[in-house]
Image (cartoon, rainbow, N blue to C red):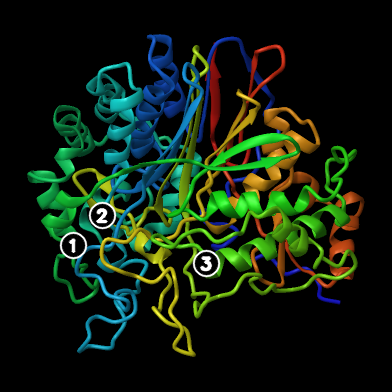
């Protein structure tokens, strides 16, 4: 039998399951109930900004915009205006749900080997590596997509939504323990960029101490320009010129990117139809491609629907039979996702009911399959070698009229590319492309780098409906394991009937298409138990051939549930510093 994998050594954590640092688990979190509107975000300043907008009569979309600009200041390691996002919006008056794609794009000069070779004539890899070089930086889309959605669903003036972040940037805020620990973890990389070092590090090159009041006048000025010009401020003019200069700056220690002003001017966010699926009689709206999150969540649940998952765990720890079943379904879904899902490729029949019935029949209740093969004809495509997606944040909103937003937003790795300009960090999202355009047999990879293409994401903002009625707003950060977090939350809400806080706080578990099955060791019932229900879970998985990993999983989900009595149940992930607000 394969024993549980040990926790990674300090500085060597598994970024697939722990994309940002772990800062513990808050055991005092309880469900928040509101009567009119609610917000859940990963940071109290963002929650407060969004609640303030709703209190003044703003819409759910308005609140999400205010939250995002605040997150770029107070949780800069996870998301910001230098990154991208996906957004689902429910309009209660019309009953319509709309998806918005603000994913970053590759510059026009990018080639299939953009992340692995300096040029066609120079086979050396980018330095210090692809993640930290200018090659990782995609054309930002966050501001463009927020502006696009605001034009359709906003009520409050655009500039008013950015004003709270401008004020907070001038007044400052105390560095939280999580932000301090994140800076400390990344200080070597931040030191390579003079602007990032000035902002985040002290004169000795150490992380600015917890409690230090951190101001950001450059961010305030940038936000003021965006308040005046909208997304055009990032397409042309001084901000655009500063971004291109920073990305393309020549350096012996950091390979520059090939982004141009034309790339920035040409970026367009996309409004599209959501990806619809069903589970236990409910309707689920998810993101279509370029994200793989919606289809992979839906495929996993489509297989699990053929099984009774039982009620909530009596002792708080899921049974080994359940974790085995869910992780095997995820392996099958990831196998198809890894091969077929990419920007510009039509989603195959991954959600066909007969197909999913055949797929779930492959699961042996007594033995893990380890890794699964795709179940559809590959038509010459190969699964690529992906680099993991890292730092991300989630905003969930329901307003007084019943409109809702699920916004998942990212700059990729914690602190993105570590390139800072004009008070904000630039993403390293292009590392979500497959590293090579073909596999070892010369077969093309769907998720290869191509000019203007959006890299595949795992982000999975989700809205749940009972007929026409909104029932839940769900989403999570966490890189490639976002899919697993969202699946767990939906099972906890729909199959087990847990409230929002119970669902988000329950133990994390799941698998990508590898032999490793992850169980979140940060949860007190998992990490601290030498025997009891956690030991039963681990032993039950090991006996089925799983390689169990108990690394921390700082997921950061944000969940809102509309109860039958009309009140809103709110939950924020105890693994980060999120809060729920509303009235």
Answer few, some or many: residues within 10 Å of disc 3's Cα (few below 14, many 20 plus, some between 14 and 19).
Answer: many
Q: Which residue is at 81% across, 36% downward?
A: 496
Q: Earlier in the sequence, mark 1 or mark 3?
A: 1
Q: Which residue is at 43% across, 68% downward?
A: 447
Q: Earlier in the sequence, mark 1 or mark 2?
A: 2
Tell me the quadrant of the picture where the C terminus can be found: top right
Q: Are marks 1 and 2 in contact (CB under 8 Å)?
A: yes
In what element is the residue under mark 3? helix
**x, y percent for residue 499:** 73, 27
Left/right of residue 135 with respect to residue 564 in the rendered view: left
Which label sits on residue 581? none
Residue placed under numbered mark 1 in the picture: 259
Which label sits on residue 139? 2
Query: Which quarter of the figure has residue 224?
Result: top left
Q: Disc 2 to disc 3, how far (Cα)? A: 24 Å
Residue 521 can be seen in this image: no
Foreground tag (1 vs 3): 3
**Eyeballing the image, is 465 above or below 93?**
below
Q: Disc 1 to disc 3, how far (Cα)? A: 28 Å
In what element is the residue under mark 2? loop
Left/right of residue 255 with respect to residue 459 in the rendered view: left
Q: Which residue is at 46% across, 52% downward?
A: 391
Query: Which quarter of the figure has residue 548?
Result: bottom right
Q: Disc 1 to disc 2, how far (Cα)? A: 8 Å
In what element is the residue under mark 1? loop
């Amino acid at each position: 039998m394969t024993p549980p994998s040990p926790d990674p050594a300090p500085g060597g954590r598994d970024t697939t399951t722990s994309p940002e640092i772990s800062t513990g688990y808050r055991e005092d979190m309880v469900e928040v109930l509101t009567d009119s509107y609610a917000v859940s975000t990963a940071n109290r300043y963002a929650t407060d900004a969004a609640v303030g907008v709703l209190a003044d009569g703003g819409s759910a979309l308005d609140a999400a915009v205010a939250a995002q600009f605040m997150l770029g200041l107070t949780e800069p390691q996870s998301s910001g205006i230098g990154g991208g996002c996906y957004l689902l919006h429910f309009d209660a008056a019309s009953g319509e749900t709309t998806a918005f794609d603000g994913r970053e794009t590759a510059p026009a000069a990018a080639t299939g080997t953009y992340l692995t070779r300096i040029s066609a004539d120079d086979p050396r890899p980018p330095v210090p590596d692809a993640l930290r070089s200018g090659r990782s930086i995609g054309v930002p889309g966050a501001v463009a997509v927020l502006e696009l959605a605001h034009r359709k669903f906003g009520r409050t003036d655009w500039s008013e939504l950015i004003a709270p972040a401008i004020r907070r940037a001038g007044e400052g805020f105390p560095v939280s323990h999580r932000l301090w620990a994140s800076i400390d973890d990344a200080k070597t990389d931040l030191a390579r960029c003079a602007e990032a070092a000035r902002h985040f590090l002290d004169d000795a090159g150490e992380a600015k101490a917890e409690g230090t009041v951190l101001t950001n006048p450059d961010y305030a000025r940038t936000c003021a320009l965006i308040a005046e010009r909208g997304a055009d401020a990032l397409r042309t003019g001084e901000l655009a010129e500063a971004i291109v200069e920073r990305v393309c700056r020549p350096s012996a220690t950091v390979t520059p990117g090939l982004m141009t002003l034309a790339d920035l001017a040409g970026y367009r966010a996309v409004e599209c139809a959501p990806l619809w699926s069903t589970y236990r009689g409910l309707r689920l709206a998810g993101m279509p491609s370029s994200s793989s999150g919606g289809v992979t969540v839906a495929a996993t649940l489509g297989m699990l629907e053929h099984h009774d998952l039982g009620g909530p765990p009596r002792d708080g720890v899921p049974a080994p039979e359940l974790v085995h079943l869910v992780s095997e379904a995820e392996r099958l879904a990831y196998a198809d996702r890894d091969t077929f899902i990419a920007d510009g490729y039509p989603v195959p029949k991954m959600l066909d009911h007969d197909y999913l019935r055949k797929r779930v029949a492959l699961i042996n209740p007594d033995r893990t399959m380890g890794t699964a093969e795709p179940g559809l004809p590959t038509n010459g495509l190969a699964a690529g070698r992906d680099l993991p997606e890292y730092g991300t944040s989630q905003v969930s909103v329901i307003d007084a009229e019943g409109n809702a937003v699920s916004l998942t937003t990212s700059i990729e790795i914690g602190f993105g590319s570590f390139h800072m300009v004009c008070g904000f960090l630039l993403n390293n999202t292009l590392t979500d492309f497959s590293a090579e355009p073909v596999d070892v047999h010369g077969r093309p990879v769907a998720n290869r780098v191509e000019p203007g293409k959006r890299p595949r994401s795992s982000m999975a903002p989700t809205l749940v409906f009972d007929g026409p009625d909104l029932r839940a707003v769900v989403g999570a950060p966490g890189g490639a394991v976002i899919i697993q977090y969202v699946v767990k939350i939906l099972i906890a809400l729909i199959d087990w009937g847990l409230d929002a806080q119970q669902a988000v706080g329950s133990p994390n578990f799941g698998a990508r298409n590898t032999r490793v099955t992850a169980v979140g060791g940060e949860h007190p019932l998992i990490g601290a138990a030498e025997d009891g229900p956690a030991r039963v879970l681990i032993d039950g998985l090991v006996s089925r051939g799983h390689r169990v990993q108990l690394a921390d999983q700082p997921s950061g989900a944000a969940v809102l549930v509309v109860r039958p009595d009309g009140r809103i149940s709110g939950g924020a992930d105890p693994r980060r510093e999120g809060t729920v607000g509303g009235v």
